[in-house]
Amino acid sequence: ALGVLNTPLHAAPTAGNGGYRPLFGTGEIRSSNIAMFPKWKGALARYFDERRLAKASCQSTRFNRCHLAQWTKFLDGLRKKPPMDQIIAINGYMNQKRYIIDPRNYGVRDYWATPGQFLARNGDCEDYAIAKYMSLRSLGFKDSQLRIVVLKDMNLGLAHAILAVYHDGRTFVLDNQIKTVVPADKVYHYKPYYSINEKHWWLHRPLLARRNRR
């Protein structure tokens, strides 16, 4: 479950993201006040605190040294590959995990898990996106190249989260609902509410209706 942001944002519009087009044909307003997102900040804090790991079986539902070793081995196998190959591999690897809603997994309506928690316990849409985000960061992608995007799936009428990756002049969507990595300008059924990385967040406002190119 994802809460939709209703808080007004007091910030000036920015000219895209390093020359990239705004996501899904929206206007973007940027702010550096990520304190407004405690679940994201909490996931970041827990991620950087997961170095103190116990020995346990990989079947444990608590992230431990065994899970870390598996994840590290997978990432190490990608380090010398081209960036696009890394993006595709990360998306496919994480999309193999099982989807499970937060109330069943954590007993709360909405919980943003760390990659460790996700790898040990599976998760829902934002957990896939966070795990992909942190995996690409570990491979050397800059935070400015990555955003968690909270949006509305217009086909299903539901809130959803994906990872947007900015690479080589294009924006790519990494989505647990789509098997392959796809360019953002080929996706027409998403309406973004906000996107966020480690330093900034962006409020998305609709502009003119996008042409239906399907």
Image (spheres, rainbow, N blue to C red):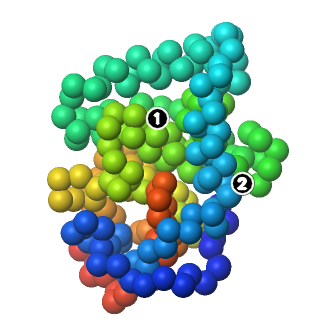
Question: Where is residue 138 shown, x and y percent of the image?
Answer: 40, 34
Residue at figure coordinates x 22%, y 25% from the top left: 80
In the rendered view, tell whether residue 21 sits above or below residue 115.
below
Dot 1 crowding, Cα within 10 Å, few <14, some 14–19, many 20+: many
Q: Is residue 213 above or below residue 70?
A: below
State the residue at coordinates (35%, 79%).
Answer: 14
Picture coordinates of residue 4 (x, y %)? 63, 71
Q: Residue reaching furthest right?
A: 107
Q: Is residue 21 visible in the rendered structure shown here?
A: yes
Say whether residue 182 is left or right of residue 136: left
Q: Which residue is mark 2?
A: 110
First in sequence: mark 1 vs mark 2: 1
Which quarter of the rendered picture does the C terminus lie within?
A: bottom left
The amino acid at mark 1 is: Met
Q: Position of residue 137 (x, y in %)?
A: 39, 40
Residue occupied by mark 1: 94
Assign the N terminus to one quadrant of the image: bottom right
Occupied quadrant, residue 144: bottom left
